[in-house]
């Protein structure tokens, strides 16, 4: 994750404008989430794509979301790997019995 954050920072750092403000970044993330939702609805929902609509994929839209998320984190000096580790720790402690586990052989 650190490498991804550095790669995005290198890209953004070449422009005078730099990162957008947190509010603008949130708006951009919301926009990208809407585009992802639209693609998911086309593939798995009841709304087929119009013939005139550009062919995007869920993979592309997830990539856009990831890029904006990394920009957002970088703009606020947040280490996403550290954030991820905190969430995993939370799931492995507080939420460890929240979901029904798949039984493995020998249990």
Image (cartoon, rainbow, N blue to C red):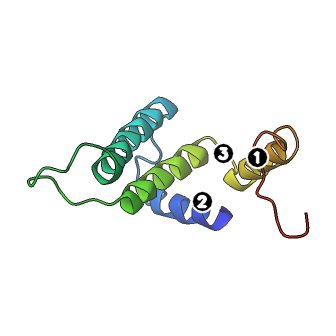
First of labels 1, 2 by sequence position:
2
Q: Earlier in the sequence, mark 3 or mark 2?
A: 2
Q: Nearer the viewer, residue 3 or 11?
A: 3
Residue at image x 38%, y 54%?
Answer: 61
Assign the N terminus to one quadrant of the image: bottom right
Q: Residues within 10 Å of mark 1 (few under 14, many from 20)?
A: few
Q: Name the spot of residue 28 as percent of width and height, x first.
A: 39, 39
Viewer-nearest residue: 43 or 54? 43
Q: Residue at x 47, y 55 (%)?
A: 67
Q: Residue furthest front?
A: 106
Q: Which residue is mark 2?
A: 5
Is 107 displayed left or right of 60 in the figure?
Answer: right
Among the 4 quarters of the image, the one containing residue 93:
top right
14 to 96, vertically: above or below = below
Q: Tell me which numbered mark, 3 or 1, is placed earlier along the sequence.
A: 3
Q: Is residue 74 above or below residue 98?
A: below
Q: Is residue 90 above or below residue 79?
A: above
Q: Which residue is mark 1?
A: 100
Q: Secondary structure at mark 1?
A: loop
The residue pinned by badge 3 equals 77
Task: Tell me if mark 2 has few (under 14), some (14-19) or many (20+) residues whose alpha carbon lies within 10 angstroms of its own.
Answer: many
The answer for how far apart the CA atoms under marks 3 and 2 are is 10 Å
Q: Residue at x 81, y 60 (%)?
A: 103
Image quadrant where one finds the C terminus: bottom right
């Amino acid at each position: 994750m650190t490498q991804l954050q550095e790669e995005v920072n290198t890209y953004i750092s070449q422009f005078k404008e730099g990162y957008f403000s947190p509010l603008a970044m949130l708006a951009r993330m919301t926009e990208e989430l809407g585009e992802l939702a639209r693609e998911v609805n086309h593939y798995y929902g009841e709304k087929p794509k119009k013939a005139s609509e550009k062919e995007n994929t869920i993979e592309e839209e997830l990539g856009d979301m990831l890029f904006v998320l990394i920009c957002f984190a970088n703009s606020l000096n947040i280490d996403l790997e550290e954030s991820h580790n905190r969430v995993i720790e939370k799931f492995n402690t507080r939420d460890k019995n929240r979901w029904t586990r798949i039984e493995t052989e020998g249990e």
